[in-house]
Image (cartoon, grey):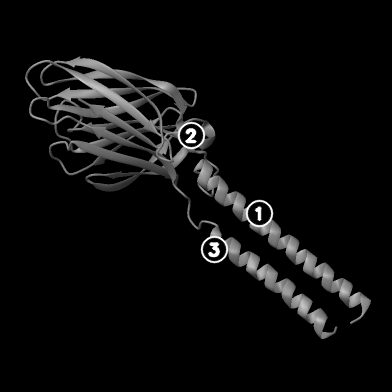
Amino acid sequence: MSHRSRTVGAVLLLAGIVFLSASAYSVLIGVGSVAQLGGSGQVDVPRDGVIVERVRLLQGNNLNSNSYNNIEVRLRTTSSAYDGPYTVCIETNRGNFCKTATVTTTGATVTFGVTGGTQEPTVSVRVYAAPS
Amino acid sequence: MNSKSILSVLLFLAVIAFSWFSYSVLTPASPMPLTSPTFELNSNTAPARQLYAKSASFVLSGTYVTQVQVVVYNARNAQQSAAITVQIYDWSGNLVSGGSASVTVQGRNIATASVNLSPSVPYSSVGRVVVNVA
């Protein structure tokens, strides 16, 4: 093997290792930001970029009842940079639901119709959203 | 070009292919959701109490949650007092904040209690908010 061939081989190998390292680093950074910030993967929205301000259990439009057939969620963005359409989903005792809504700094209210009935001793509502 | 040079080129191409494969597999194909806190509303549905937690609202100062406002419904005909406790858990399940308050609720009516959190917590660290009405 000539000196020139060895040099070419070493350069190519080094370039490959650098490329691999850069790729692995970018992947790790990307995964890290998703895990830590809740970023969308497409738009870097931090976890506190969209705030769920309120959850209400409504009978029709009323709180004044021991039953509910609507779950209302109020969200807002913390910066206009994060304004836009989001798919808002809830996981609850009475099923899982999603709706698309435009969320802005002034807020958005999303109401999910659920099966009616007397309120359970424990009602758990997990809310999540993703840019859509 | 001798066989070792060809081997080097093949190795280089294999490294690139592996890098691209790793990137394709590990990078999410669709947007990841923004995970938000779970709200857990615990009511006292015992016949003697019939107090229901109907709503929980965060009050923020900047990006810190300082207070949780809780709406309580009293399903009995008579007025009664409701004790409200709020617990805030982080994403690892650790209790990081909380508070309590009490409110008088008229029969067949609602009342709002404001529970100040101590300490206030960054919204981004709130994994679960548990409201107990007793």
Q: Is residue B132 visible?
A: yes
Q: Secondary structure at mark 1?
A: helix
Quarter of the image for the C terminus of chain B: give it.
top left
Apparent side of residue B12 relative to residue B124 in the rendered image (left or right)? right
Q: Residues within 10 Å of mark 1 (few under 14, many from 20)?
A: few
Q: Are marks 1 and 3 on the same chain?
A: no
* Label drawn at residue A48: 2
Q: Is residue A62 visible?
A: no
Apparent side of residue A48 relative to residue A110 in the rendered image (left or right)? right
**Which residue extends farthest right?**
A3
* Label drawn at residue B25: 3
Quick one: A84 or A98, which is closer to the camera? A98
**Which residue extends farthest front?**
B94
Q: Chain of mark 3?
A: B
Apparent side of residue B128 relative to residue B110 in the rendered image (left or right)? right
* Label drawn at residue A107: none
**x, y (%) of residue B108?**
11, 21
Q: Residues within 10 Å of mark 3 (few under 14, many from 20)?
A: few
Q: Secondary structure at mark 3?
A: helix
Q: Residue at x 20, y 20 (%)?
A: B82
Quick one: B80 or A41, which is closer to the camera? B80
Please, is residue A104 above or below residue B113 in the view? below
Q: Which residue is mark 1?
A: A25
